[in-house]
Amino acid sequence: MGKKKSAARFFKQEAIVFIVVIALLAFFCAASPDFRKYTTILTIMDYSYYIVLMAIGVSFPLITGGVDLSIGTGLVCYSLAGGYLIMFCGWPTGLAMIVSILFGIAIGFINGVLIGVMDLPPFLATLCTCMITRGLGSICSRNTGISWPTLGQPGSWFRNIFKLTLGDETKIPLGFLWVLILALVMHFVLNHTKVGRYTIAIGSNKEAAILSGINVKFYHIMAYVISGFFAALASIAYSAVFKTVLPGTGAGFELEAIGGAIIGGVSATGGAGSIIGTFIGVFIICLLKTGLPFIGLQANWQQIVTGLVLIGSVMVDIIKKKREAKK
């Protein structure tokens, strides 16, 4: 019975978020003729890929009742490390991508051990690895911007994974298909595998999870490994859609990913979440980021509006939990 109520709750949440996305699209299209151009769609997609991937991954630590603040600077660090291997060491693009992914998994594992085994507060542990990855990124790049192979150069094939170029100008946002598939896969993992079910159990009641025989330390680590893995995938997406990656950047990316996850239905206090909701919720962030300048509002207003939307989502989550507790 509880599962049915939970499924109904998230279906409703996903539906509401989807309606908000459609409403925002309609509003910006009506407010600005320029917004309706195909190039704007490409811009929204370019912004969405790396945020969606980070949001999918960070949903797992959030559901445990934790957080991962290292994914933003981590994304830049893994991208700089991979780009350095290509530019200065002559490594093939594919091998550099694998190294970036392994780097992300390693940082996720360290976060998991610090939090799940050593019982450090998630905020503190991931804030420390956030600073570490920011420093490592600068070291990897020698404090200079790094560019992965551009179209036409050897090894530039990876860019077509996210934006396929046909002819001279036609660009197809192929990355949307891949991130959708990954969202569906992780939706299945969250709802139909031990990793997902135990992640939810840890966030719902950690003590009860321990008493029921769940290896809480292992699944806590797994949640952060998943987050690190998806941050690494996000670094590849970021490298594919932007020409240059700059050291010292990335701070704030994690807030967009966490915001999208919470807007999409991941509980701010843990124990519940929806990957499909997260996928849709990120597009609210991306639409605000892209659309507000079209109606004359600067980037600072985008941050304010996003913050207000996030506060509203958290308040809705708190109200829902209070109502459920009374039943």
Image (cartoon, rainbow, N blue to C red):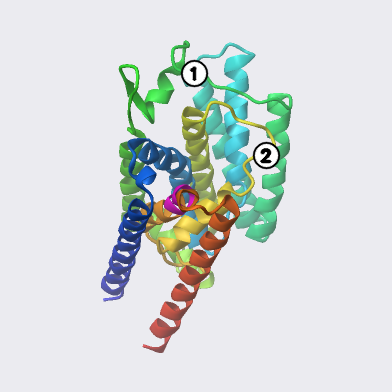
The quadrant holding residue 167 is top left
Measure the alpha-carbon separation of dots 1 and 2: 25 Å
Residue displayed at 39% across by 82% down = 324
Residue 246 is at least partly visible in this image: yes
Residue displayed at 34% across by 22% down = 169
Residue displayed at 62% across by 47% down = 70
- Residue that mark 2 sits on: 133
Three-letter amino acid code at the position of disc 1: Thr
Q: Position of residue 52 (x, y in %)?
A: 43, 46
Residue displayed at 52% across by 35% down = 235
* Within-10-Å neighbours for mark 2: few <14, some 14–19, many 20+: many
Q: Nearer the viewer, mark 1 or mark 2?
A: 1
Q: Position of residue 82 (x, y in %)?
A: 57, 25
Residue 318 falls inside the magenta stretch: no
Instruction: Please report the bounds of the magenta region as a residue range.
Output: 287-291
- Residue that mark 1 sits on: 150
